[in-house]
Image: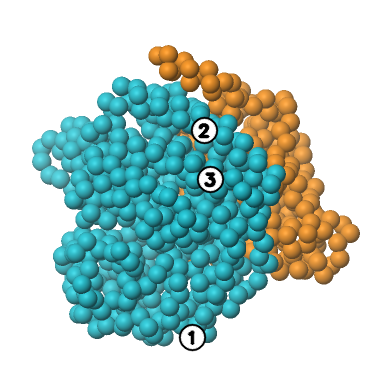
Chain colours: A orange, B cyan
Amino acid sequence: MLNTLRNRFEQGYRTTKYPKEKIELWKRYRGRPQIQDASPAGMARACAEACPQDAIDSEKRVIDMGRCVFCGECEDRSQGTFVAFTQDFEIAVSEKEHLITDGAIPDLAAHARQHFKKLFGRSLQLRQVSAAGCNACEADLNVLATPFFDLARFGINFVASPRHADGIVVTGPISRNMKTALLETYAAVPDPKVVIAVGSCTLTGGPFRGSPEITEGLDSLLPVDLFIPGCPPHPLTNLHALLTFFK
Amino acid sequence: MSTAFLEISNGVAVPRDKIPHLDFDRFRREALDIVENGGKVVHFFAYQEGDVVKLSAVLRQDHLLTAGCDAPDTYPALSSQCEPFHMFERELAEQFGISPEGHPWLKMVRYHPNYMDRVDVFGNNYDDDIPGNYDYYSVEGPEIHEVAVGPVHAGVIEPGHFRFNCIGERVLNLEIQLGYQHRGIETLIPGAAAKRLPIIIESVAGDTTVGHSLCMAQAMEALSSTQPDQGAHTIRTIALELERLQNHVGDLGALSGDVAFLPPMNYCGRMRGDFLNMSLLLCGNRFSKGLIRPGGVRFTLDDEVRTTLAQRITEITPQVKHVIELLFSTSSVRSRFENCGSVSQEDAEHLGLVGPAGRACGMAYDVRRCFPTEGYGELDIPENAEDSGDVYARAKVRADEVLQSIDLIQSLLTAPVKTECPEPEERAMAPDAFVVTLNEAWRGEVAHCVLTDAAGNLLRYKIKDPSFHNWNGLSMSLRNTGISDFPLNNKSFNLSYCGFDL
């Protein structure tokens, strides 16, 4: 008993004050990409060529955050003169075309569906469906339940049954072998329901684009309400998206 | 013992014409001989060259051995004599339509049509996309009932189907059907642009990003005769140990949660996050994505990062130690961990278990000690073998490894680390070459085998996650165990669905 109490004391209080207080992430973290206006066209082409995900359009000078895995090769190549990754983790969007950006991202709160706020603002129960990702997105959704983030204090929970859920959170590039199970889970959620796509794989196929075994974008199967980019999205990106869109 | 197989080294490329190409009967005889005398299967796969399909095997005793042969359309199964080939032969049948006759349990692995447009060995119709459509092994009797779980599970976890045959609470047999996470990685890689390879490999299994990335980088380096500097080896070693810490600490907490002892569950959950943030400190990503590339690492360990990391480790170490002490000194935890889900050493040897799951059954094998890569040659890795093979042993091995990994990282952080980050470039690879790379990731032996063709392009990229060996260990642990202990046993193995499904 004494040991249990000693441990409790040593562990202390750990829950973040976010979103009331801002959090600064470490400088090596790669959040919202910012395209630099002054960069020459040649550098833009070099970055587009270097990008393993072919996420950069050098003519339009934009980057597709849905394809991007935030590896930072383009930033390395251009020494930050064409693309620089900021530490801004608040990068979720409500429309797929908003993922294609020069660095400016529309305010999520302004685009949030107002009727969702009314319906789910005080209580949001989500069923997660893992559909052929690498389990990193799942892991960084899971940590939202740990004491630092403590998602439940906002009235948001992950639940065991789609019948108890207000929506689904999908991760992974939806393999051929998971498609039916995903669609059946969606069908089992009562209306009105929400669909949240998490991670590069779910948004566009991510690293697996081109494979005949996967789906390049959940939006080709289901109406997606919230797109959360990243590989995987930082837990704070997920937290920000859920709070801004629903609260 | 003399053998026709060629002795090779971990991470050293060999010309393919130096590898013995035997006739099938001799290949079969020699491979069985090695494995029946205590050898283990690292790889056993097929590849297509021109119109010919060939087999290749990498086995291990004290060293690595390899040989190949032309693949027959059908052949007498090796598994009928020697169990460790079981999964590999099923995979061969699924990928290349080669039928092992007399295989004790020939069923699909990942549920996809074979690469060769041959008649399906399992008689499946792949227009129907449910891998679970299959006659499961079933026990018959008036009191027997079946429990079917998945593919969508109750938590935020990956999909897989579990079929239990029970009498009352007692599980007689658990059959596991995976394949839901199949993304076609092995067929995607050879046709994809070279710049995509590190990104694809980082997503084989996100919780083993470093383990798989190291295998990929070492293979590419061996094929292109590139030598990373000492600093890069040190940073990669630190990254692999951080990955071990993240997962072991997280799982110890989850095990505690599964026996309803909540304090360590919450503490470990939070501390796991702190270890993930240490990877972010190093390379900007909590899962070390973007860190490892052929030729070295993309991020230096400058003094600011090194001292910050050392400080964070120093601060968290006593907390980790105290929580582990709390977990293992609590009698209600011990009474649930001990004698739960035991796997005997004999069964573990037959199944070829690796990593902590194998060490918990008395098999001390650890790639870091037996075939060291990166900085491990200079480090002292203890044997960590427990003998009870139960949940307690699996948890104990993991807890010991947590403390050892902390020591290893601390010892690597004492002196400045200098490295030159390599320029991303396409390196020419040796033509007609063969390399196998092994690393001890947190679940055990990860092994990649890469073959190049006459032009130096990728001919075959074979991936094996430790889960490929260990899923059957989980099934075995459930024999005669209460079904309510499934979550506890499952978490004690915590195997990868995506690493298995590829």
- Mark 2: give few (<14), some (14-19) or many (20+) Cα within 10 Å: some
Q: Chain of mark 3?
A: B
Q: On the rendered structure, is B429 left or right of B113?
A: right
The quarter in which the N terminus of chain A is drawn is top left
Q: Quadrant of residue B427?
A: bottom right
- Which-is-in-front pick, marks 3 and 2? 3
The image shows residue A22 at horizontal and vertical percentages of 74, 31
User: Disc 3 versus disc 2: distance between alpha carbons?
Assistant: 14 Å
Residue furthest top in the image: A2
Q: Considering depth in this image, is A120 or B220 the residue closer to the camera?
A: B220
The image shows residue B264 at horizontal and vertical percentages of 44, 26
Q: Amino acid at mark 1?
A: Ala
As drawn, the label of residue B317 is 2
Q: Chain of mark 2?
A: B
- Seen at 73% across and 36% down, the residue is A24
- Seen at 27% across and 50% down, the residue is B363
Q: Amino acid at mark 3?
A: Ser
Q: Which residue is mark 3?
A: B411
Q: Earlier in the sequence, mark 1 or mark 3?
A: 3
Q: Evaluate if marks 3 and 2 touch, with contact meaning CB atoms under 8 Å apart.
A: no
